[in-house]
Amino acid sequence: MQNFITLATFTYPFEYAVLKLLLEKEAIRFFFQNETLVGLVPFYSNALGGIFLKVHPEDYSQALKILQAFENDNHLKIV
C-alpha cells in the first residue's frame, strides 16, 4: 500500500459513499486512509488533513475518470 497514489481528499465519509460503490463495481484497487479514525472521532478529520482516497497506480487513470464523472455528471450531489 506504500505505492498507492492519493486521488482525492474528503472531510467526512458521507461525501464519498456513492463513489466508493462505483469504484468497487469497476474492481478498482483502492482504500480510504484515515476512514476508521474519522468515523470514530469526526472532529479529527481536519487535524489529519481529511480522508484520502488512495488508488493503485495501475488503476489511477480509470479511477480518475470515475471520479470526474461522479463530480460533473452526477445528480446525487451532497449539498
Image: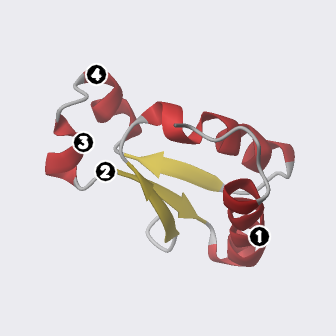
Q: Are marks 3 and 1 in contact (CB under 8 Å)?
A: no
Badge 1: few (under 14), some or many (20 or more) residues near its Cα, within 10 Å?
few
Image-quadrant location for residue 12: top left
Instruction: Tell me the tag on residue 65.
Output: 1
Residue on which the image places disc 2: 50
Of marks 1 and 4, which one's residue comes earlier in the chain?
A: 4
56 to 11, vertically: above or below:
below
Q: Residue furthest right?
A: 26
Residue type, mark 3 in image: Ser
For the residues marked 1 and 4, what is the alpha-carbon distance in whole angstroms? Answer: 30 Å
Callout 2 secondary element: loop
Badge 3: few (under 14), some or many (20 or more) residues near its Cα, within 10 Å?
some
Instruction: Tell me the tag on residue 17.
Output: none
Badge 4: few (under 14), some or many (20 or more) residues near its Cα, within 10 Å?
few
| Residue 52 locus on image (x, y percent) | 42, 56
Of marks 4 and 2, which one's residue comes earlier in the chain?
A: 4
